Amino acid sequence: MRWVALLPLVLLAGATAVPAQAVERDRAELDVLFVGAHPDDEAGSLAALGQFKVRSGVVTVTRGEGGGNAVGTEEGPELGRLREAEERRAVGKAGITDVFNLDKADFYYTVSSPLTQQAWGHEDSLGKLVRVIRQTKPKVVITMDPAPSPGNHGNHQYAARLAIEAFDKAADPKAFREQGLRPWSVSRLFTSGLKGERTRGPNCVSAFTPTEPTDRVWGVWAGASAYGGQTWAQVERAAQREYASQGWAGFPDVPTDPAQIGCDYFTQIASRVPYRVDNRGPLGILEGAIVPGELPLGTKLSAKPSKYAVTAGSQVKIDVTSSVRGPVTLTPPSGWTVRGDTVTVPADAKPGKARIGVRVASGGKSGSTEALVEVVPALTATQQPLPQVAQYQQWAQEVGHLELANLVAPVLALPSGGSRDIDITIRNQSDVAREGAVSLTMPAGFEASPEQRFPSLAPGATAVVKFSVRNTDPALPTGMRGGDYRYAINISGTTAHAALELVPATTIQQAGVSPVVDGVSGTGEYPGPELDISSRWEGDDCTSVNDCSATARLSWRDDTLFALVTVTDDVLGTRLATADCKRHWRTDSVELTIDPRGRSENTSTTYKLAVLPATAEGPPCALRDADNKQGGAPGVRVASKITETGYVVEVAVPLSEVPGAVDPASTGLNVLVYDSDTQDRTGQTRIGWSTWGGVQGDPYRWGRAKLDGYTPPPDRPIDPPAPVLPLEALASVDSPQSLEQSIRLGLAPGAAPAARPIHIRHGFLLTSEKGTAYVFANGQRHVLQVAPGLTKLPHGQLLLGFVTTRGATAAAESR
């Protein structure tokens, strides 16, 4: 209710509340900021964050609304509210009080960064992160892995890419000028983790071997003493157990033997300050940014090559930026020469990355940094990348981090016993025109078309040569059991490598009779081969065939796909209520996935059906998950039987419900089984037909099926409809935990622009803008539509979040 007539009286008599405005204040400043996608993403770094003994904070882009729930039936915003509370308790054990949510939706598990970008929106997400950095002024930012490595969550990839871009944009006075905030230069940027070999014990801070020798990695030993007689490893584990909704409450104890405790590792991506590679442990990560090195704290020092890719015999200039004056010394690898700011690569330099050391002396002291280049052959040949890898490589080039572009090994899928075309891109990296020939050397069980010549290429020019490759030995193992089948790409005396990944293939025959969906294989219902779907792809190994193994039979008839899955499982998991028929990976279930054309980049253009063989009420339930339109499964018929050795599931899927007409010659298909042997709504093992880590989100790694004799109706569209993504997320203005933090720090909730000042006066909200107020009073939540002026509020101690029609936010409380 509005009370505009009482405005003068209330203004005179009321007590002032605490508005939250987006202004720079010392109470919001941080030293270290971790940027992740979900609650729990920081959980593997808390031992280090706690040991830094500085003020750290966490940015969490989403509240994990799309994750599982092992403790209740909440989903969507209510699950986000629960998971935010878990995260705040968890990070609090490492002394962290500030968690900044960007209010984006955790829509479902995907390995696609492009789909994540579509869901979150690039400019808005980047702008919010830049705002948080400018407001909190961290000196060190830590994030996740930006590369589309197999199994890497697409949300993790994209959160990392946002952090890497924000490192530059937050310092750029021309970027996001509308925020009205001063630019802020983060000193050092890291990703969490180490690619390579590691050890345990106190020496893990230095006894590790990166796969890429030029990676700059720091380790923080988790066995150091924390508080309460605990090691930091124990504190980190206690924090991880706070994520009960994710099934982490039962995580085992960490070792007490110091020799068995490892490190949290961090790989440096960029630095604007001096650092020493040999300064190990927590201080090495903070050096130059938070703790001084040889030069005074605040000294700026960085080096950039004039070009990243260099060829043998070429030259590269090193541009050094330093805030102190003094002589600069360049130290390249052995055999390289230096003249002034120019480094000459020797004629016999081998391909690979190389670090060029930079040292600046001033006042009898010095500081160091490095420039990174990569020696490449005069002619390079690369296999065509997967779509999401191509997008990642383009991103790395656009943001000026070419050293990140080739972190993902080039692979393509090939059906067992099948063939495909592969494009090989030839690039002239030298400064003179070149021509030549390219050929492929295949491993046993594969063959490729003959050597091909390519025309003369000008410097920097490219040409594409097409090869046909075929698997000649269908007996070779597929999936993880076969791994990558590497082959050589030969060009002008140099060799590059790529790989093929074999996926299983089958022919689905037409049923002689229309199958009766009853959990039994009747005569003529499934004439095709039986598929072994017992290969593990994630989780614990099956202890025996009785623990977890399965077979599947498939057929089609009358524009319907039928599947009969027989699972051997000696211990059944939790029976979920029918109303809780979702997040099927929490218990025993079967998943059938269909990629209509066999070429989807992510699962938003696929059909994924999950079936729980039994519910608390008895009958099975079916749902669509993480696909073109997750939720109910219209037209699907399902039956199940619980047997003495496990269970049987039979389903009928109308192909009219699949997003786009099925290509009968090359349909992507997978059958996956999730095994749970506990009653705590957590899974232990995942098995299936085409098996790779994270395969449920990677359509290119699904098997291939030929629907023998099937033709889709001529009027059925080939292209899939636009995906329906579940994008409802909890807003910070609707979270008491976020509101309390906003008021404490003096920042607008949700990393949004600040609304005009709001006030609470004797039970009234005073605002000059139209919007929505979320009011928490005496344990109750109220949502009020607000117009400029006064709005009557509920009685009691009040905590209030406010969002205007233009998306600006504020928070206030009554005193």
Image (spheres, rainbow, N blue to C red):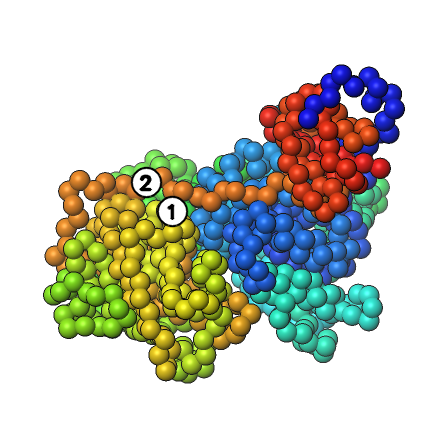
Q: Position of residue 167 (x, y in %)?
A: 63, 39
Across and down, in percent, residue 408 comes to: 45, 54
The residue to which callout 2 is attached is: 721
Q: Are marks 1 and 2 in contact (CB under 8 Å)?
A: yes
Indicate the quadrant where residue 813 lies.
top right
Estimate the spatial distance between the alpha carbons at disc 1 and disc 2, rounded to whole Å.
Answer: 9 Å
Residue 424 visible in the snapshot: no
| In front: label 1 or label 2 | 1
Secondary structure state at the residue bearing disc 1: loop
User: Looking at the image, which residue is at 23% across and 40% down?
Assistant: 717
In the rendered image of this protein, does residue 194 appear above or below residue 171? below
In which quarter of the view is residue 361 placed? top right
Dot 1 or dot 2, earlier in sequence:
1
Q: Amino acid at mark 1?
A: Lys
Q: Give the quarter of the figure containing the N terminus.
A: top right
Which residue appears at 46% of the width and 67% of the height? 616
Q: Is residue 39 visible?
A: yes
Q: Amino acid at mark 2?
A: Pro
The residue labelled by disc 1 is 629
Kindly state the secondary structure of the residue where label 2 is placed. Answer: loop
